[in-house]
Image (cartoon, rainbow, N blue to C red):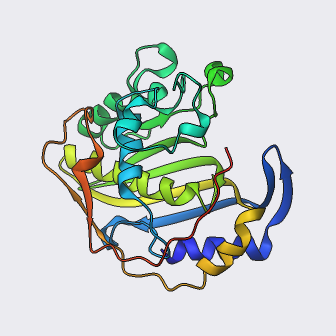
Amino acid sequence: MKQYIDLVSKILQNGKMIETRNGNRLTIYGHQMRFDLEDGFPILTTKKVSLNLIAGELCWFLNGDTNIKQLHEWNNHIWDANAGEDGELPNGYGYQWRNYGGSGVDQIERSISLIKKAPNSTRNVVIAWNPVDMDKMKLPPCHFGFQLHVDGDYIHLQASMRSVDVMVGLPFNIASYALLCHLFARITRKKAGELIMDLGNTHIYEPHIENAKVQIERTPYSLPVLVISLGITDDLKGLNPNMFSLYGYNYHPSIKYEMFA
């Protein structure tokens, strides 16, 4: 994960302090990260990141769920600060992925079908950004879309983000989309190739700066290997975080960063 350390260093050195709705942020605009998934699973080693939380959130998205009740059953509370009193997060990621704008269009199902029937298509895009539903969402999607590229036996996934909380959100986003690429590869009998992250407004919150300086001084360990259990459904529904684990995950001590909702 040298790419991550390099990005944090770049922002600390070249970022501009911008005042926003939820705090000051050291900001750059536009950055791309690329990970060869055959080199290992791209999860931070300069501090511990919970695969269980990441996998639980992704399973929740893939199920099309919009209430945090299921997350709570998995002891996952990462969306609590953004949910309503009833636990609802209306019209968010999973809703748009599985039922875009309430149209009945299942973008994940369509994406799987394109991999199988038209692997060279440039139209294999899944989008969470829906202007019609924007005012109904508790938080407009930060990672707003992804595209799948099939190259022979390999699947590459390219994800796009409008707003990037580098110290809290980005490590989750990288690992989540890497996991999603592996899942598409598993059910279509292909190999996970490259993960490409296109980052827009890329920032470090001011209270995170001092700990970020500590983290970039740590030497990353070798990346672990992702292990996926049997029983992954062909439609990627009904999954749970216990289906995923990491072999050989070594990491430095935890560093705490406050989340700004």
Position of 233 with respect to 179 (left or right) is left
Residue 195: image location, x then y, percent: 43, 59
Residue 150 in view, yes or no: no
Q: Is residue 210 above or below residue 105?
A: below
Q: Is residue 107 above or below residue 215?
A: above
Q: Position of residue 2 (x, y in %)?
A: 51, 78
Q: Identify the residue shown where x is 36% and y is 35%.
A: 62
Q: Quadrant of the C terminus?
A: top right
Q: Quadrant of residue 239?
A: top left
Q: Position of residue 132 (x, y in %)?
A: 64, 18
Residue 209 seen anywhere in this rendered image of the structure: yes
Q: Give the side of residue 75 with respect to residue 117, left or right.
A: right
Along the viewing direction, whichever of 179 and 80 lies nearer the viewer: 80
Taking the spot 30% from the left edge, 57% from the top edge, the residue there is: 192
Q: Residue 28's spot in the image, x, y percent?
A: 75, 62
* Residue visible at 39% across and 56% down in the picture: 178
Q: Nearer the viewer, residue 106 or 135?
A: 135
Is 81 above or below relative to 35? Answer: above
**253 and 186: which one is in front?**
253
The reply, left or right, for residue 253 in relation to residue 164 is left
